[in-house]
Structures are given as C-alpha cells and as structure tokens.
C-alpha cells in the first residue's frame, strides 16, 4: 500500500496538467447534469416554481360574506393565512372578449402568503383607485396589457399589471379568472363572498386540515374549496409533452457525459502505458495496478463532483438568462437536496465503473512494451489515398492531418462517435425549436387555420352575425360551426363532435393522412380519437349525440392540438341532416396575412355593439413558450459536454503526434506546418462528428417529435427539420471551436524536443 501511494503521489506531481484536466472535466460534466436537472424541474413544473416563489397557500376556501374565518389561523398545522379577501363574481370585457371573473379586494402591498408574481406592469397603487391587476391567463384571454382599459362590473378600469398565481387557473366556461383591486373598488351585492388561503406546515395534512376548516366554519358557509393538488394537476396537464421530451434529452445528455468521462479516463491510461510497464517490472501485480488507477481516478472524480456541487450551489443562480432563473427556482423546490446528492453520486459511481474497465486494460499491460502494428516499421505508413494526395501537390499539413485523424488504429471511430452524440442532441433540440416556431409562423399547418373565434349572443341571428363578420376587410372567411359532446360506442367515454364550415365553403383542416371531408357523412378525426376507438382512416364509426345516433365515415386524420386529439370533425351540413334544429354557436375567422387579431377583434366588437364575444385561438405554442428558453440553455449544457469530449480528443491527438515530431522535422516541415498537422487532424475529427451528428439528428428529431405528438393525441405530422443554414452554422461552429482549441496545445507541443519512444503508443 505504501508503494502504491508513493507512486500515485509521484504520478500526480509529474502529470499535474492531466490530473487538473480530469478534475475539471468531471466538474464540468457533473455541473452540466445538475444544470440539466434544474432546467428539467423549471420547465416541466412551472406551477411548482410559482408556488415556491409566491409562498403559495395549500388550499383556498370560499365562504359567505358573514363567515368567521378568523378562527382558521388557530387550527393545528396552519403556518400562515392569506386573507380573508372580499370577493365579487362578475364579468370583464375588453376588445370584444368577455370572461367571468372573481374581483378580489386586496391592499396596496402584495400579501406575504399566496403572493401574486408580477409578470408585467406594477401592483395596485392608491394613486390609481380604478386600477386592477389581472391573472396572466385571464389577461391573454381578454387581450389586455398594462395601460389598457377594460370594463369590470359595468365600470371602466385601468390594467396596471398582470400576475401569475399558484391557484387554479382561469378556464373559459369553467373557472373564473382573478382580478385584484383595491377594497374601494369591490362592492357588495350579488355574487359577493370572501376567500381565505391557508399555508400548512406539512402539505400532506391538506385533506385533514380542509375537513377541520370546513367543520370550524360550518358546511353551509363554505361554497368552494380548492387545494394545491388540484391546481398542480391543472397546470401540469399542459407540460406533460414538454416533460417527456426534456426527460429524453436528459437521458441523452447523461449518456453523452458518461461517454465523455470514459474517453477522458481511457486517454489518460493510454498515456501511461510506459509507466505501467515500469510498475510491472518492479514487482507490482495486475491487481495492484488496477487498484492504483481506480483509487486515483475515484479521488479525482469525488473532487470534481464536490467542486461542481459547490459551483452550482454558490454561483448557479448568477448565471445569465433562464439558466440562472432555473437554478434559483430549483434550489427552492422539493427534492432539490436529494438531486444535489444523487446526481454527483451517480456520476462518481459511473466514473468508477469506467475506471475499472480502463484500469483492467492497464493491468494487462506486459512488463516489456510490445510494439503495436500501427507503430511497427511499415505498419504506420501512409495510405494510398494519402500518397496520391501528396503526389497531386496538396498541402502536406492537410494530408498528414487527415491521415493522423483517420488513418491510425481503431480509436478514430470511437472518438468521432463520442463527439457526435452531443452534436446529435443539439440537432434534435434545434428540431424541437423549429417545430414550436412553426406553430407561430404557420399555424394553418398544425390545425390552427383560424386566428379568432366569434360567439354571437342570442340577439343576433345567424345571417346578421355572418354579415357582420364578413363585412370586415381583414376577415377572409367566417366558418360557422358548433361543438357538441358525443358518446363513443359502449357509452364509456365522451369526445368532441365538431361541425365546422359547409360543403360549399369547407374549413381547411390540417390533414396528415387521407383526404378532406366533402361528401355526406364524411369526417376527419384526431389521433386521440383513432386511438380511443382503435380505428383507422377509412373506417365507419357510430356516435351518440343527444340520444340520437350519428354514423360517420372517417376519410382523413387531422392534426388536433386540443382535447388530446379526441375530436371528430365534419361539416355543419352533415350535422344538420340528422339534427335539423342546430344553429351555429361560433364562427372561426381566418384573417388576411399581416392583420392584427386584436385590432380586428376590437373592430368587430364595436360594430356589433358588444354582441359578439371575440377570442383569440390558442394552441400548443401558447403552453410551450418556456421551451424556447429551455432549448437555448439545453444547447449550452450539451455544448459544455461536447467541449469536454473535444478537449480529450485534442489531448489524445497531441500525444499521438509526439512520436511523429522528429520525423516531420526530418522531412522539412516547419514548426508552423507541424502545428497545422495537429490542428487539421482535430478539425477533421470535429467535421466528421458534426456531419454524423447532424445527419442522424434530423431524422431522429423528426421521429421523436412525431412519436410524442402521437402519444399525446395531437398526431404525427407536426415535426419540421431545422433550416439548412442552422445546420451549416452548427457544423461550422463545431469545426471552428475545435480548431481554435487545438491551436495552443499543438503549438506548445512543437516547441519541445520529443524522443521517438513508445511512451505515447497505445
């Protein structure tokens, strides 16, 4: 043991640079994995982020105005109370859009518990007594921004700001949105009440504490109870697809990091083959050699992992952009400490496994090194292609660099594969970015041809509503329609049956399979419906609508972003054939390119004297806005892993070129040309990896996105490959980065007089 420790100490003093690199590589990879974990928690659970930052209440109780809510603070397990706040249920209208709202009286200072998080604008101000703050989802539905005027309970109000909350979100027709106002703006009347939020010391006691709170107030005084579990479930439903995609990217990043560590350790062992032979010659057994390398590299791994934890813990929140925000939020989420320990521990265990494999190879090194075939006389000569290239007077540095990269041994393919993996994942991330951008730039290709939805009230006839809508110069089409609930065969589930457009003017559904519905009883269906009924395009299905059967022929599969794809769509004429009394309840409006939906909605509301409820169409892009910033941060994490692998590849290339230094000088190459050989070898390796990564990443991204879209009911056919300029920029950045990193080590290597020994032979 003493001899092993003395050799390890001597090796550390002799190869300080390699040891520091391995510690830095481990720290970089563990930090990358921790940042990826933070991004995953930040992006896939926005509700938890809001709940943590706002000190959210674990449940909210809505009661009658006279209920004595003061006794709730004395219940066991209650850590803090938010409220009580006087409330009034009313209606808000802005730019032709209307919504049910809960007007809540609060003070000029945000509450400590259940605090709304400002998204834009400012909080309530006594200097603006008519000012209100809107829940962010409600503000989007009303097209309201800070500074706009809207009508609440028949009075004009000024929007001071918008805020996020951890309470259950606004859903049209289901849950009212929250409007915060000063107490003077909330008057008693019909729909009046009060709401109070309770934050608990133990969230697991929520159900029990709710029962005690209801008992304390009296069941007759409580109108509604909403818990944090319900709010979380509502919020997480929209991020399930994002969570699945990021989970797969996380696994890919873990694999890339694992291969990078394995490559770094294997490269270091290859660089110590002569030292290992000396150890064998002085009496070290193979087991002792294995233990020396294992203990040494485990020590490096533990040191690097601890350094990564300290860096992320201390400075992660100071990183610029969304990455720093993600770390700050992640540090306050449940399970943060467990992840902070498990991720480095898993990385150290993997490094130990990789070291065992490389050290086992070191234990098999003979006491007297054997000259490998690649270094034997004549075994490492130039290939025929290289000699031909030299005969054609191509630059020697280019030819010899290409030969060094691909003309020696079996290590070149493995190096290219390890470096290609993070580039492949970056290409797939760009594919996800492009697909999400397509929802905004070309919504008609993903089932969102209409920009606005208009719902006339009972005072407007069908003819009057259609005439008002089509009279606007920016409205190119107003498709009448309605949506009803239908029972599937066996009466075991409910789906949405949509009648939209007429046979003369059909609605332009985005079709991924089959054809459009033109004839009687023809329809198109979403992927979710096909999976539910185990049907396919060409089948006939039987539904029940209002107790009456409806038989439809599925002639196509449409991309359906809503209702999990459990939608079957036909023309309004087809529905009227079986139900003559049906009248359209909505109109889907298509606008001319470049038209402003908000301006059009305001014009239509004014022209109809507010008898039209105008709302903007919503799609997956509205729920996946976090993905854009996350993709950028994810690319940065993958780039860091790729940089680690690239540094390992450069070190191996420089070491392998050491034995060629005298030969290259002997044939007349200058130090600058010898440096160019190493730089060219590194650039060729990076170019091959970039081409391989992008070539495989594009089809894999297409498959992954379509697979996840099919699993969530939207249906395959939404994936789009990254633009060619983006792919070329990725390849160019990889090659340029490799060349830039290789210049300094290659130049330093040419200044040393290296003996042509077997010390660098693998």
Image (spheres, rainbow, N blue to C red):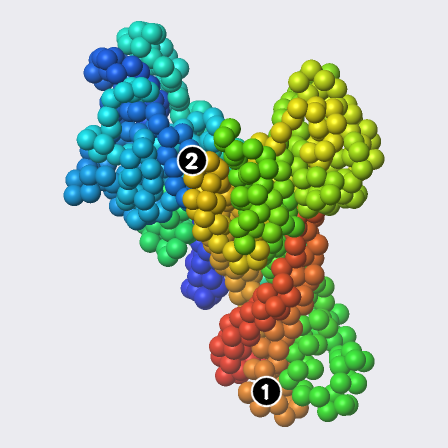
Camera-nearest residue between 410 and 401? 401
Q: Is residue 73 left or right of residue 480?
A: left
Quarter of the picture containing the C terminus is: bottom right
| Quarter of the view holding residue 566 | top right
Identify the secondary structure beneath mark 1: helix
Q: Is residue 116 above or below residue 697?
A: above
Judging by the rendered image, the residue that carries numbered circle 2 is 98
Tell me what residue is drawn at x 63 percent, y 24 percent. 485
Tell me what residue is drawn at x 65 percent, y 39 percent. 560
Tell me what residue is drawn at x 59 percent, y 71 percent. 732
Q: Position of residue 322 (x, y in %)?
A: 41, 52
Camera-nearest residue between 160 and 216? 160
Camera-nearest residue between 472 and 95? 472
Q: Is residue 434 left or right of residue 390?
A: left
Q: Which mark is residue 491?
A: none
Q: Position of residue 480 (x, y in %)?
A: 62, 38
Q: Position of residue 524 (x, y in %)?
A: 74, 37
| Quarter of the view holding residue 556 | top right
Q: Is residue 503 above or below residue 697?
A: above
Residue 54 makes an appearance in the image: no
Q: Is residue 521 above or below residue 263?
A: above
**Gap in angstroms between the C-alphas marked 2 and 1:** 73 Å
Judging by the rendered image, the residue that carries numbered circle 1 is 673
């Amino acid at each position: 043991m003493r001899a092993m420790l003395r050799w390890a100490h001597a090796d550390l003093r002799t190869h300080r640079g390699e040891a520091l690199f391995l510690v830095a590589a481990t720290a970089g990879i563990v930090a990358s994995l921790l940042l990826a974990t933070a991004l995953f928690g930040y992006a896939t659970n926005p509700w938890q982020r809001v709940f943590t930052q706002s000190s959210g209440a674990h449940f909210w109780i809505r009661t009658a105005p006279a209920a004595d809510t003061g006794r709730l603070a004395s219940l066991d397990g209650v850590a803090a109370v938010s409220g009580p706040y006087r409330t009034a249920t009313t209606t808000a209208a802005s730019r032709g859009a209307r919504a049910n709202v809960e007007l809540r009286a609060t003070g000029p200072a945000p509450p400590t518990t259940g605090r709304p998080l400002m998204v834009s604008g400012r909080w309530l101000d006594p200097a603006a007594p008519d000012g209100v703050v809107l829940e962010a989802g409600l503000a989007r539905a009303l097209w309201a921004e800070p500074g706009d005027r809207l009508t609440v309970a028949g009075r004009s109000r000024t929007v001071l700001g918008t805020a996020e909350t951890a309470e259950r979100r606004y859903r049209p027709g289901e849950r009212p949105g929250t409007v915060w106002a000063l107490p003077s703006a909330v008057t008693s009347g019909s729909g009046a009440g009060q709401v109070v939020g309770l934050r608990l010391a133990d969230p697991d006691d929520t159900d029990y504490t709710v029962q005690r709170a209801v008992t304390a107030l009296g069941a007759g005084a409580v109108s509604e109870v909403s818990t944090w579990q319900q709010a979380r479930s509502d919020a997480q439903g929209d991020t399930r697809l994002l969570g699945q995609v990021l989970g797969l990217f996380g696994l890919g990043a873990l694999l890339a990091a694992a291969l990078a560590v394995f490559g770094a350790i294997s490269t270091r062992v290859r660089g110590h083959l002569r030292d290992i032979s000396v150890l064998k010659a002085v009496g070290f057994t193979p087991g002792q050699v294995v233990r020396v390398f294992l203990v040494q590299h485990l020590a490096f791994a533990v040191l690097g992992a601890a350094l990564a934890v300290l860096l992320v813990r201390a400075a992660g929140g100071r990183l610029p952009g969304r990455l720093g925000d993600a770390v700050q939020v992640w540090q306050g989420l449940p399970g943060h400490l467990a992840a902070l320990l498990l991720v480095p521990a898993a990385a150290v265990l993997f490094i130990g496994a990789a070291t065992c494999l490389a050290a086992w190879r070191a234990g098999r090194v003979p006491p007297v090194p054997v000259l490998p075939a690649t270094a034997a006389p004549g075994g490492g000569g130039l290939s025929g292609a290289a000699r031909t290239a030299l005969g054609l007077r191509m630059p020697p540095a280019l030819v010899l660099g290409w030969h060094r990269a691909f003309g020696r041994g079996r290590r070149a393919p493995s190096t290219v594969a390890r470096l290609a993996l993070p580039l492949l994942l970056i290409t797939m991330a760009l594919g996800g970015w492009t697909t999400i951008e397509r929802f905004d730039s070309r919504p008609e290709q993903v089932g969102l041809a209409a920009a606005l939805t208009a719902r006339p009230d009972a005072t407007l006839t069908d003819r009057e509503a259609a005439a008002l809508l089509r009279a606007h110069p920016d409205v190119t089409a107003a498709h009448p329609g309605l949506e009803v609930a239908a029972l599937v065969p066996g009466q075991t589930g409910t789906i949405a049956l949509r009648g939209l457009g007429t046979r003369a003017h059909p609605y332009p559904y985005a079709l991924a399979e089959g054809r459009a519905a033109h004839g009687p009883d023809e329809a198109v269906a979403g992927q979710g419906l096909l999976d539910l009924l185990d049907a396919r395009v060409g089948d006939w299905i039987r539904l029940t609508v209002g107790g009456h059967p409806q038989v439809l022929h599925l002639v196509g599969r449409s991309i359906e972003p809503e209702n999990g794809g459990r939608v079957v769509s036909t023309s309004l004429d087809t529905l009227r054939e079986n139900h003559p009394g049906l009248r359209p309840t909505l109109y889907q409006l298509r606008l001319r390119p470049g038209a402003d939906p908000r301006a059009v909605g305001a014009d239509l509301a004014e022209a109809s004297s507010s008898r039209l409820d105008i709302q903007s169409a919503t799609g997956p892009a509205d729920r996946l806005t976090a993905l854009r910033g996350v993709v950028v941060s994810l690319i940065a994490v993958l780039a860091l892993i790729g940089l680690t692998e690239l540094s390992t590849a450069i070190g191996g290339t420089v070491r392998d070129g050491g034995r060629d230094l005298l030969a290259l000088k002997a044939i007349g190459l200058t130090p600058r040309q010898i440096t160019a050989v190493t730089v060219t070898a590194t650039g060729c390796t990076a170019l091959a990896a970039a081409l391989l990564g992008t070539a495989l990443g594009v089809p894999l991204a297409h498959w992954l996105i379509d697979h996840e879209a099919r699993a969530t009911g939207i249906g395959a056919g939404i994936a789009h490959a990254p633009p060619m300029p983006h792919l070329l920029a990725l390849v160019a950045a990889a090659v340029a980065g490799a060349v830039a990193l290789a210049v300094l080590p290659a130049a330093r290597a040419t200044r040393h007089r290296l003996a042509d020994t077997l010390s660098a032979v693998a």
